[in-house]
Amino acid sequence: EVQLVESGGGLVKPGGSLRLSCAASGFTFSSYSMNWVRQAPGKGLEWVSSISSSSSYIYYADSVKGRFTISRDNAKNSLYLQMNSLRAEDTAVYYCARYSVVAATPGVDYWGQGTLVTVSS
Amino acid sequence: QSVLTQPPSVSGAPGQRVTISCTGSSSNIGAGYDVHWYQQLPGTAPKLLIYGNSNRPSGVPDRFSGSKSGTSASLAITGLQAEDEADYYCQSYDSSLSGRWVFGGGTKLTVL
């Protein structure tokens, strides 16, 4: 069974930093691209970042480019999101999401349960 | 403002059929990119409902179906049940954006 378990969320002051982790199990982690998708309170889904299976290709949404860094450790079956210079508008539930390989267009086939990041003074 | 446009809400009585539209443009759905649909039950993470416009993952009831035409896509739910009450999101890919993944704003389905 595919499992994605996020951790690392919490309350942080504007301008602060936080590192999210996602522990993957139930599949060959090193064979899949991975993503972070966030959802602000009461709002819709927003794609944040993607990383290919070998970390060769990395993409970011314009809203986080230059502040967030996605990375992975295939030996530890783990995905990370380093978030710096946090702003109030970064407040959201952050989901770890597996890149779907069954469709020609990129999408997600499995989601974690999410971890809440709150940016407030 | 989402790149893909969905109605904020739809509703239907148990047993009825409802549809949710997802309207894009020539740089995403109209460019030939597939549409995926996700269901988010209250207080839970999203779940893949339809992939590649019209395909159901294992375990998704055949009451859910998807279609795509031109620059739009639709999700249809027949035989509406109380447990279908959820938020539904469409998602595709956009060649004109640096990030390229795009979601609809979401549609809240209320079962009356």
Image: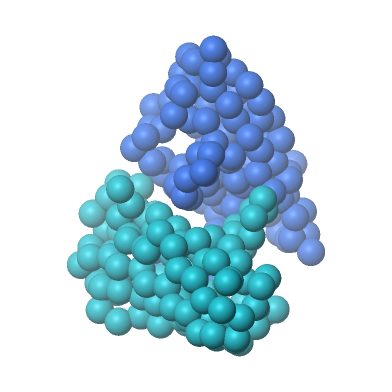
Residue A77 visible, this angle: no
x then y, percent, for residue B35: 41, 70
Q: A85 left or right of A118?
A: left
Q: B11 left or right of B45?
A: left
Q: Quadrant of residue A11?
A: top right
Residue at image coords 62%, 71%: B84
Nearer to me, B88 or A72 = B88
Residue A61 visible, this angle: yes
Q: A10 left or right of B10?
A: right
With respect to residue A108, does B72 lie above or below?
A: below
- Look at the image and give the colour of chain B: cyan
Residue at image coords 43%, 25%: A67
Residue at image coords 37%, 63%: B6
Task: Chain letter for blue, please.
Answer: A
x then y, percent, for residue B66: 46, 81
Residue at image coords 30%, 68%: B23
Question: In the rendered view of the protein, which quadrant contains the C terminus of chain B?
Answer: bottom right
Nearer to me, B34 or B88 = B88
Q: A69 left or right of B96?
A: right
x then y, percent, for residue A116: 63, 35
Nearer to me, A48 or A32 = A48
With respect to residue B85, does A113 lie above or below?
A: above
x then y, percent, for residue A35: 54, 49
